[in-house]
């Protein structure tokens, strides 16, 4: 279980960092375009640091605790447990940001990014749990998870950009 959770963390952190740095670039050029090579490299470094730190500090232990509790309680992997797990993955970072900052408006972008990463981590971990008994090689599974996560991240990021565009 720890091996699977750790692999889920690494896959999610690497893919989320690349996709987020392309779709939500931080602009370090004074009024210029954010899509320059040095700016994207700096974005990748920053997103990699914060996404990996967040997943290792919050996502990995939280996922391990949830799975241990469900195994201890003898609950099978059903849709209700998956919905509750996803809600916990999304709620914990939002509650943490809300306790640290004064208003939700101060951290709306961070909360959207944290939610995207939480949903992505849940999806990768669920897929790895579902497919752990199949005899497909790890490299093939890794390729499939990465392609699925890239597609999912792009759709979710574009949807959040659309929602942010409507709110302004």
Image (cartoon, grey):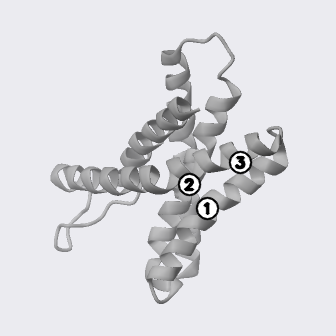
| 134 and 24: which is toward the camera | 134
Q: Provide the secondary structure element on which disc 3 rests.
A: helix
Between discs 1 and 2, the one toward the N terminus? 1
The residue at 21%/55% (across/down) is 42
**Is 78 on the left-hand or right-hand side of 4?**
right
Q: Provide the secondary structure element on which disc 2 rests.
A: helix
Are the residues tagged 1 and 2 within 8 Å (C-beta)? yes
The residue at 52%/50% (across/down) is 61
Residue 90 has which mark?
1
Q: Which residue is mark 3?
A: 69
Between discs 2 and 3, the one toward the N terminus? 3
Q: Measured along the vertical axis of the image, is residue 158 above or below residue 163? A: above
Across and down, in percent, residue 60 comes to: 51, 47
| 32 and 38: which is toward the camera | 38
Residue at the extreme bottom: 102
Across and down, in percent, residue 120 comes to: 56, 47
- Marks counted in the figure total 3
Residue 118 has which mark?
2
Across and down, in percent, residue 159 comes to: 59, 60
């Amino acid at each position: 279980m720890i091996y699977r959770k750790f692999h889920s963390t690494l896959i999610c952190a690497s893919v989320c960092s690349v996709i987020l740095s392309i779709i939500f670039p931080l602009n370090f050029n004074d009024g210029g375009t954010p899509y320059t090579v040095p700016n994207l490299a700096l974005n990748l470094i920053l997103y990699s640091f914060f996404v990996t730190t967040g997943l290792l500090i919050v996502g990995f232990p939280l996922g391990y605790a949830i799975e241990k509790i469900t195994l201890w309680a003898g609950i099978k992997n059903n849709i209700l447990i998956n919905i509750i797990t996803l809600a916990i993955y999304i709620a914990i970072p939002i509650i943490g940001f809300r306790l640290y900052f004064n208003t939700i408006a101060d951290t709306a972008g961070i909360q959207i990014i944290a939610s995207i990463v939480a949903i992505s981590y849940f999806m990768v971990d669920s897929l790895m749990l579902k497919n752990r008994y199949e005899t497909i090689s790890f490299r093939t599974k890794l390729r499939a998870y990465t392609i699925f996560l890239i597609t999912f991240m792009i759709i979710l990021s574009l949807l959040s950009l659309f929602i942010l565009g409507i709110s302004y």
